[in-house]
Image (spheres, grey):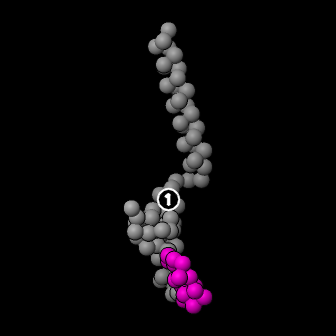
Amino acid sequence: KSRFIAMPNILLDERAVPELLQHEVTPDRLAREALMILENEEYAQSMRAKLHLIRSMLGTPGVLARTADFLLREVELLSAVSHAKAL
């Protein structure tokens, strides 16, 4: 079980982005979080760096299609081997 709910935080297992739950989502709180990003360059840069790290963790674009192609090739290979053994 993760202590986070936001996907970036779950992937990094640390607070990379703010998490506001139900009663915490107020105009004042949203404004404070937005201002923190806009006015605190160090905070904003840290958040950007963590988000870039996630991008590198997930791989290049098209990873899902490449994974699906790989799995299909493996299934076809296993099917061919199984068929050859049956002969």
Report the residue marked by disc 1.
56
- The residue range painted magenta reads 18-35
Answer few, some or many: residues within 10 Å of disc 1's Cα (few below 14, many 20 plus, some between 14 and 19): few
Q: Residue at x 56, y 48 (%)?
A: 63
Quarter location, residue 26: bottom right
Q: Residue furthest front?
A: 23
**Residue 79 higher or lower than 19, as above or below:** above
The one nearer the camera, 85 or 41, is 85
Q: Residue at x 57, y 40 (%)?
A: 68
Residue 76 makes an appearance in the image: yes
Asked if the magenta segment contains residue 32, the reply would be yes
Identify the amino acid type marked 1. Answer: Ser
Q: Residue at x 58, y 47 (%)?
A: 64
Q: Main secondary structure of the magenta part?
A: helix
- In percent of width and height, residue 46 lies at 47, 76
* Element under disc 1: helix
- In percent of width and height, residue 65 lies at 60, 44
The one nearer the camera, 37 or 60, is 37
The N terminus: image quadrant: bottom left
The one nearer the camera, 24 or 81, is 24
Residue 38 makes an appearance in the image: no
- In percent of width and height, residue 45 lies at 50, 78
Q: Residue at x 48, y 19 (%)?
A: 82
Quarter location, residue 29: bottom right
- In percent of width and height, residue 9 lies at 46, 68
Q: Residue furthest top?
A: 87
